[in-house]
Image: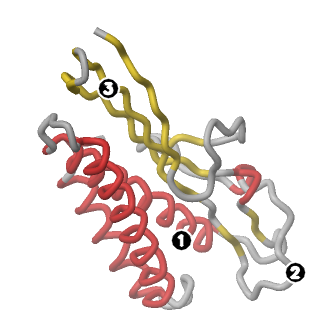
Amino acid sequence: MKSLLIFFTLLCVGIFSNEETVTWDETSKLTWADFKAEPDAESDAVALTASGITFGYSLKTAGKRIAAVSTTVEAHFYPNKSWYLKDKGNAHILAHEQLHFDITELYARKFRQQLAELEVNQNIKAQMNALHNAINEAVSKTQKRYDQETMHSMNIEKQKEWEVFIGKELKALDQFK
């Protein structure tokens, strides 16, 4: 049997990047010390969270047939692309930024679930690539909707609703963490 190892990277990071990352962990929350980039002077935002999903897979082949697939999916935060305004950053804003990272983890779990449901076949690479594209689109739409509905954290009631919603969604997909 031969093994073929191929890595794909979703959102914010290049293939085989050595960029500093923080992997999502339910026991560890972001701190302002994690936000290391210089603030964008052109932005109206108080902070920016750069996060993404890394995806890799290996295929075992028997002759020309794909016999097995192994995948890895992780949600990452990118400190050197994330920033905040030191004079305006507070615990409320940090919680808003943490939820962006939590949303990334939610979609990493959804992606793991979808990958687990695939059956090994000769089209598995195309199927994984299609899932890859769909998950990128979905997480992007959700991140934008989150910012719109919470008015970038200014709508405190909506912020709390999102925190509860994402918490429940993560819990529902606990088996895929």
- Residue sitting at 23 percent across and 44 percent down? 115
Q: Mark 2 points at which residue?
A: 41
Q: Classify the position of the N terminus by image quarter.
A: top left
Identify the element where label 2 is drawn.
Answer: loop
Q: Distance between the residues labelled 3 and 2?
A: 45 Å
10 Å neighbourhood of mark 3: few (<14), some, or many (≥20)? many
Q: In this view, does 160 lie to the left or right of 122?
A: right
Image spot of residue 125 (x, y percent): 31, 43
Q: Distance between the residues labelled 3 and 1?
A: 38 Å
Indicate which disc, 3 or 1, sits on the residue closer to the N terminus: 3
Q: Mark 3 points at which residue?
A: 59
User: Closer to the observer: label 3 or label 2?
Assistant: 3
- Residue sitting at 73 percent across and 71 percent down? 89
The quadrant in which residue 124 appears is top left
Q: In the rendering, which numbered label is found on residue 168?
A: none
Q: How far apart are marks 1 and 2 (CA)?
A: 20 Å
Q: Mark 1 points at which residue?
A: 96
- Residue sitting at 73 percent across and 56 percent down? 35
**Label 1 is placed on what type of residue?**
His
Identify the element where label 1 is drawn.
Answer: helix
Residue sticking out furthest to the top = 1
Indicate which disc, 1 or 2, sits on the residue closer to the N terminus: 2
Image spot of residue 34 (x, y percent): 70, 50
Indicate which disc, 3 or 2, sits on the residue closer to the N terminus: 2
- Residue sitting at 61 percent across and 73 percent down? 93
